[in-house]
Amino acid sequence: MEYVIYEAKDMVGVITINREKALNALNSQVLDELNEAFDAVDLNTVRCVVLTGAGDKSFVAGADIGEMSTLTKAEGEAFGKKGNDLFLKIEKFPIPVIAAINGFALGGGCEISMSCDIRLASDNAVFGQPEVGLGITPGFGGTQRLARIVGIGMAKQMIYTARNIKADEALRIGLVNAVYPQAELMEQALKMAQTIAGNAPIAVRNCKKAINEGLQVSIDEGAVIEEKLFGDCFESYDQKEGMANFLRKKDDPAKVKHVAFKNA
Ligand code: DAK
């Protein structure tokens, strides 16, 4: 792959968008390669993915304006579908995806981060949906996900004004979970990914599914989704061993040990 790097180590996968000269802007090739990279994640061994951008200036500066500038209506729709399909794939990816946002996250960059489960930002990160200034709408889920994350009023303000916000404001409105000095961002993202990877994988996957699917339906239907995914954890090695470990600890604190969950 020319613009995307995928590496996996210690149950954590790292996908890096590597088109630094164009501030990691998303053209069709980047979208295709990201799709390939997510397909390459071995779900038997990897339990959490970190998505980031190459360099220290930009996570993703949006969809590629050069490529979009000459699109016909039909091509625009096809480009939008390519992006939306990928972003939905990330959102529904069976294991958690953490966005490590190391600079500009504009337009499609803000949108791809919002399809991730958790957003961690560097202190130089800048977020925004500048599309209305370019004569288009946020087309990779921005009109849908931003309001779900930060609330309707703040989402409308960001989208209608096309004003960028800095990392501290993104933290204040709940767009990101945490802000770190640039030099610490990846270390912190990997640390969180390792913590997630150390928990029972079937349970973590089921939590992601329950939260995502529950948000689309009424609370009554959400409760049914939750019950099924809760039940699904039982009879697994991980559930039996996780609970047995707790009971052993109660009997004798000296028996406290880390459970090596097996994803089984
Ligand atoms: N596309 C293509 N190239 C980009 C780019 C982008 N979005 N952003 C930056 N670059 C390129 C620049 O052209 C420049 O390339 P060279 O001239 O060196 O060849 C290089 O990256 C460095 O950028 P600058 O020289 O501009 O760097 P500065 O530090 O001066 O400025 C900046 C950084 C991030 C403030 C500035 O580059 C900028 O404003 N970039 C554009 C940000 C932006 O407006 N992003 C949103 C794009 S719109 C849809 C599907 C998708 C979308 C919407 C609808 N459907 C089909 C419905 C999504 C839309 C978007 O994402």
Image (spheres, rainbow, N blue to C red):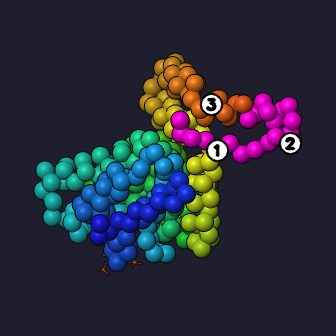
The answer to whether the beta carbon of the residue marked 1 is less than 8 Å from any atom of ligand 1 is no
Which label sits on residue 260?
1
- Tally of numbered tags: 3
Q: Where is residue 154 in the image (x, y as percent from the top left)?
A: 51, 48
**Mark 2 Cβ and ligand 1 under 8 Å apart:** no
Q: Nearer the viewer, mark 2 or mark 3?
A: 2
Q: Dot 1 surroundings within 10 Å: few (below 14), some, or many (20 or more)?
A: few
Residues in magenta, as a range: 245-264
State yes or no: residue 250 in magenta.
yes
Quick one: 114 or 130, which is closer to the camera? Answer: 114
In the rendered image, residue 259, in percent from the top left (x then y), is placed at 68, 42
**Residue 9, visible in the rendered structure:** yes
Position of residue 207 relative to residue 154, above or below, is: above
Residue in the image at 35% along x and 65% along y: 4
Q: Which numbered disc, 2 or 1, marks the residue that appears first in the sequence?
A: 2
SS class, disc 2: helix
| Residue at the disc numbered 3 | 239
Q: Which amino acid does label 3 sit on?
A: Gln
